[in-house]
Image: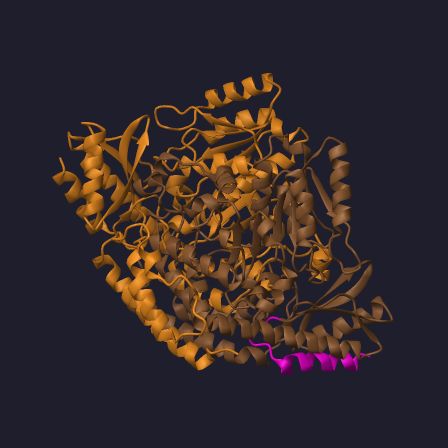
Chain colours: A orange, B brown
Amino acid sequence: MAPVNNDDFRRHAHDIVDWIADYFEELPKQSVLPDVAPGDIRKSLPVTAPEQGEPFASIMSDFERIIMPGITGWQHPGWFAYFPANSSPPSVLAEMITAALGQQGMMWITSPAATELEMVTLDWLVDLLGLPPEWKMAGPGGGSIQVSASDASHLALVIARQRQSAPTDQLVAYASAQAHSSLEKGARVAGYRHFRSVAVGSDWAMSPSALADAVGEDCGRGLVPAFVCSTVGTTGTTAIDPIPAISEVARAEGIWHHVDAAFAGNAMICPEFRRYQPGLDEVDSYVFNPHKWLLTNFDCSVFYVADRKPLLEALQITPPYLRNAQSSSGEVVDYRDWQVPLGRRFRALKLWWVIRSYGAEGLREMIRSHIALAQDLVARIQASPQLEVVAPTPFSLVSFRHVDGDEATDAIAARINHSGHSYVTPSVIDGHRFIRVSIGGANTTAADVDRLWEVVSASN
Amino acid sequence: MAPVNNDDFRRHAHDIVDWIADYFEELPKQSVLPDVAPGDIRKSLPVTAPEQGEPFASIMSDFERIIMPGITGWQHPGWFAYFPANSSPPSVLAEMITAALGQQGMMWITSPAATELEMVTLDWLVDLLGLPPEWKMAGPGGGSIQVSASDASHLALVIARQRQSAPTDQLVAYASAQAHSSLEKGARVAGYRHFRSVAVGSDWAMSPSALADAVGEDCGRGLVPAFVCSTVGTTGTTAIDPIPAISEVARAEGIWHHVDAAFAGNAMICPEFRRYQPGLDEVDSYVFNPHKWLLTNFDCSVFYVADRKPLLEALQITPPYLRNAQSSSGEVVDYRDWQVPLGRRFRALKLWWVIRSYGAEGLREMIRSHIALAQDLVARIQASPQLEVVAPTPFSLVSFRHVDGDEATDAIAARINHSGHSYVTPSVIDGHRFIRVSIGGANTTAADVDRLWEVVSASN
């Protein structure tokens, strides 16, 4: 039946490895963004599937001719847009193996290795990031790999909801007005009818007194505060919500306190940045994404809970075809009970491979180098009378604008994004346009930031 | 910073390709199941991460020595457990490229190629499987790739909930008593407080009159029926719920009608099996998993909606940092609005690569060969006075038991699972133990079923 035998696979896979290594080599010389208009790729593809199988060479050739022109430079050293989704050669190696093994890690019995390697690797990260030791698998808590921080935050919202006996329609979820859109979306998906965007201060961090006021008002109206999210490193400007003050409000009302550190959590591998994240021993759940800034390619989002009991109570269901002796014994972890889907890929392998390849030292060095590049860029902006930084820069996201306002700011962004070598995301805060420069590519160096700066300074 | 340069990557990736091709060659000669006890792998790994980066050779050696002994044979030709998660060489090739490109397909602008290839490939599948043409992107509906059928069913439950103005606590979801556990779990996650397991008939398919009765009773109690799932090919026995009769009940009460064809939907690539799936033009959403039985490795679950409006209304939220000209123009699809998470891998590439590599003909041949193997096994069971088939076998899952009852049935399952060459999932239906033989491995042949049968017949 199979038109592809193993010798073919071996030959084609070697071809693809060379193609990938060439791509990595060429990428820095290519334009960050593709030059395609909506519909270009779609109309280059046939509207019906082939009836007969086609040779590898034809597929590869169409891939290069039709698909590649619509590929964006997420791994390009000049990618300063959104947040990084940085990857690395060791992560790609491990993903090759993950694809080949085709494991389904839904239960211990369906892949003991995928399950136990995940437990060990996420325990490692508790120490590496200086997180509360109770979050390790030997404690009351534990970690699991989710697809994305959106999934993890949605899950936290579901657990928070399931703990309440009040009707769902009375529950309220809170997050800062600068929180990621996945909080509002997750609340909606989880069935919350009340979501409050809490006011932020001049540093764009949540105001705990505004939170306390909102909670008090809601209680007065007969609603039930159920969930609050603190963000460490908001998407807009990497603002840092005051976790201890928010915990105080949460504790008083029995509110589930979730922390979204999707991007900035990775920086905690360097002890000097942990001062931005105090008070984690009082929170209920936490998410950060190694697929953003820890050289591990998407998807790899790590979700910790301080206590796994409410998590399991919310998610555990066992039909007869999933029963097995090991699960019934209670001596194994079945990760299907830690997530919404049943199936799961072997994602711990790449995390383990990356940590071993770079070591804690190598990962710290990468984080520090990006943050140093950002601080250097901030200094150049501050020395430019025409430009102003619009938010603090605790990590490696630089937010700035032109003093002449939106039009001048947008003109700079347009010049950067038409340069071919650099790409940024313009955004809006407090009604004003600004430019986000997110530094986190695996291969981004001072030369890349210099090139970006040349465009910025030439625009003044 | 990077201890891994591109020349290293090229060399190591070639090594891994050879390792993978060797693994594929050796796999059929290996035991299906690993010989490990809970904790074995965990205790072989250090409790802390390395401080310094380590060479590829050390990592690879630990991978082979510690991780591989805990890997299960999901791709082994003797894997007859659960449902298949079948993969193929072309799918692995495409996954290598997906890992290397590191695309984030959340919006058109973040990866035009990932977005448009997904649109085209899912349109192809509408024709390949004989689904309603309105589900194509040019129609009112459309398709998207989700992580798993659990995610897709959960999403359908969320859309169904969002359409209702009644309080969430009054909504009711229905599925057959033989539906996959992800329906009950998805309903709970989506906040439904009422989930009804509807009675099945002697063929284990949902009884439409039992559904009508349950709906009537709930309406009488002031509850609001909001969602019903028909399953084509239940997990227990591949029973087929009567879609047209269920649609009639759903239509009368304005209930969202979702179809879970996770496994069996793949068989519809062969026109002769479409008689098992009549009436799709009346349903609201549909899921099937190419990662189960279409040679495309996990994760790749395809979710169609007949009308994308309620889907987008349930999920669309646009913060400033995701705004862009192309999205605002409305001329592009942003797949983030079709799913719970924001980020998404470039999963369409492997689906496209597989369809082109095998062609519709090759995929049909695979499905037909598995179903023929199953029918042949059924004939052997029926010819054995000691054995009985416990459910119809429309596809390639054979469900049987020993006439002497549970103990004798379990003894057969134990012998199979200790054989080393075959693996099945024992389950329970109607209070009785039975054995599921799920035939769907990419390399499973008559010889593999013969080997399984030798153990079964020797057990009589």
Q: Position of residue B19 (x, y in %)?
A: 45, 75
Question: How would you classify the magenta stretch by its main secondary structure?
Answer: helix
Query: Horizontally, is A9 left or right of B109 in the view?
Result: right
Q: Nearer the viewer, residue A276 or B339?
A: B339
On-image quarter of the C terminus of chain A: top left
Q: Position of residue A439 (x, y in %)?
A: 29, 45
Magenta extent: B440-460
Residue A285 position (above or below residue B123): above
Residue A154 visible in image = yes
Q: Please give the name of the residue rendered at 73% of the width and 75% of the height, measured from the top-left corner.
A: B378
Number of numbered callouts drawn:
0
Query: Horizontally, is A356 left or right of A105 in the view?
Result: left
Q: Position of residue B308 (x, y in %)?
A: 49, 44
Q: Please give the name of the residue rendered at 38% of the width and 44% of the height, measured from the top-left corner.
A: A267
User: Which image quadrant for residue A354?
Assistant: bottom left
User: Which image quadrant for residue B289?
Assistant: bottom right
Q: Is residue B457 magenta?
A: yes
